[in-house]
Amino acid sequence: MRNDAVFTDNTGQQIIKDVEADKYIEIFLYSLRDFFSWWYIEMPIRHFRTWYRIMVILNDQLSITLLLRHFFLPWRRHNSFAGYFFGITIKLIYLPIAIFAFLLGSSLYFAFIIFWILIPIGLGIAIVKTITN
């Protein structure tokens, strides 16, 4: 089996090749590719995870699913007509407000994600319009 030495010659002397430095345009293109990879792949994944976590926290703080699951339970475990009536009435009043707050909070963050994705496109369009005018 023959073993080709990559960094030594036949006499065992170490070969050091001159390495060319990257050109400025290569550095710029690499930085541009790295930036767009970060902007459009890494950060949207992070934002969508944060959006999911915001929805979980809002649901936990507003107790929406808990109140929907226990909608027909009496208020404070008072097993009379008044307890059932009062419990259902309070939940009917509270749930639309809580659902509205949940939808508002989650939709505002979703709008932020869409805005995040569209910023470079809008800046590119604005730069092209500025240059052409």
Image: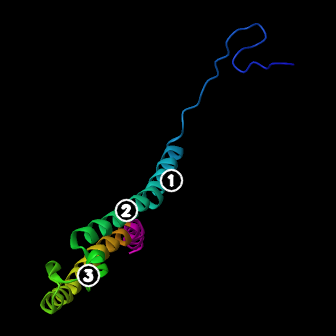
Residue bounds of the magenta highlight: 117-133
Q: Residues within 10 Å of mark 2 (few under 14, many from 20)?
A: some
Identify the image quadrant of residue 100: bottom left
Residue in the image at 17% along x and 78% along y: 77
Say whether disc 2 or disc 3 marks the residue closer to the N-terminus.
2
Count of picture labels: 3
Instruction: Report the quarter where the N terminus lies.
Output: top right
* Above or below for 110 versus 79: above
Q: Amino acid at mark 3?
A: Ile
Q: Residue furthest front?
A: 79
Q: Position of residue 92 (x, y in %)?
A: 20, 89
Q: Where is mark 3, residue-wise?
A: 99
Q: Where is mark 1, residue-wise?
A: 33
Identify the image quadrant of residue 88: bottom left
Q: Is residue 132 shown in magenta?
A: yes
Q: Residue furthest right?
A: 1
Say whether disc 1 or disc 3 marks the residue closer to the N-terminus.
1
Q: Residues within 10 Å of mark 1 (few under 14, many from 20)?
A: few
Q: Amino acid at mark 1?
A: Arg
* Above or below for 84 versus 16: below
Please name whichever residue, 130 or 97, is drawn nearer the observer in this view of the structure.
97
Q: Which mark is residue 47?
A: 2
Q: Position of residue 43 (x, y in %)?
A: 41, 58
- Name the element at disc 3: helix
Whether residue 31 sits left or right of residue 62 in the image: it is: right
Q: Amino acid at mark 2?
A: His
